């Protein structure tokens, strides 16, 4: 099959890229467009390190054919980070020691972003359930859960 052009919105900007059939969004983001915050972990959809938002919903980009995001809005960690500093989620992860190697962090933050967009006041169990598809080998989940709780407070003007 011949290469095709896929158009989508990436981090708020119209993007078009020529791709081979069944090329994954992860491959396009990392290898073609240079968005390396989207990690290449298991490449089987099990670790969550490649999670991005597609129309505000978390998706594992390693299993997603890039053709499936045509005319959709894709947000990576790079698109979440403001020019003047860190997003409240990133700041909360930093201040709560929710990263060690950092490999899982972009996926964790993107899942947390989708959660907080849909539910600005999640309880602990809801946070745990939202993060269940993301695997962390070194930080442990307690600091990550605390960081999401802290970010929820920050985004809600200090209210839990």
Image (cartoon, rainbow, N blue to C red):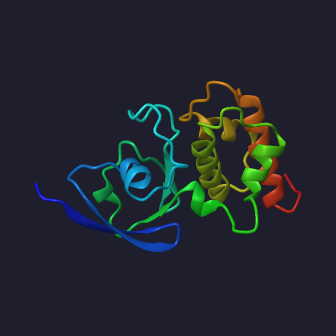
Tell which of 44 and 34 is nearer to you. Answer: 34
Q: Residue at x 59, y 50 (%)?
A: 110
Q: How many marks?
A: 0
Measured as percent of width and height from the top left, residue 51 is found at 50, 46
Position above or below: 71 against 40: below
Q: Residue at x 52, y 66 (%)?
A: 11
Instruction: Answer left or right for 75 relative to 71.
Output: right
Instruction: Answer left or right for 72 relative to 114.
Output: left
Measured as percent of width and height from the top left, residue 83 is found at 69, 68
Q: Residue furthest left?
A: 1
Measured as percent of width and height from the top left, residue 45 is found at 42, 36
Q: Residue furthest bottom?
A: 14
Instruction: Answer left or right for 107 relative to 160.
Output: left
Question: Image quadrant of residue 7?
Answer: bottom left
Measured as percent of width and height from the top left, residue 115 is found at 63, 51
Position above or below: 141 against 120: above
Position above or below: 79 against 149: below
Q: Pick the quarter of the image with the N terminus.
A: bottom left
Q: Residue at x 28, y 50 (%)?
A: 23
Q: Residue at x 32, y 55 (%)?
A: 66
């Amino acid at each position: 099959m011949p290469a095709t052009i896929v158009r989508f919105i990436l981090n708020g900007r119209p993007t078009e890229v020529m791709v081979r059939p069944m090329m994954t969004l992860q491959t396009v983001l990392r290898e073609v467009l240079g968005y390396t915050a989207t990690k290449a972990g298991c490449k089987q959809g099990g670790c969550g390190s490649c999670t991005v938002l597609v129309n505000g919903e978390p998706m594992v980009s390693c299993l997603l054919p890039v053709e499936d995001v045509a005319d959709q809005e894709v947000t990576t960690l790079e698109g979440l980070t403001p020019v003047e500093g860190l997003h409240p989620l990133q700041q909360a992860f930093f201040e709560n020691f929710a990263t060690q190697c950092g490999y899982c962090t972009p996926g964790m933050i993107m899942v947390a972003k989708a959660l907080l967009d849909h539910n600005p006041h999640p309880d602990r169990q809801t946070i745990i359930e939202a993060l269940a598809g993301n695997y962390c080998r070194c930080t442990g989940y307690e600091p990550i859960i605390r960081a999401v709780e802290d970010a929820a407070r920050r985004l809600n003007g200090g209210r839990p």
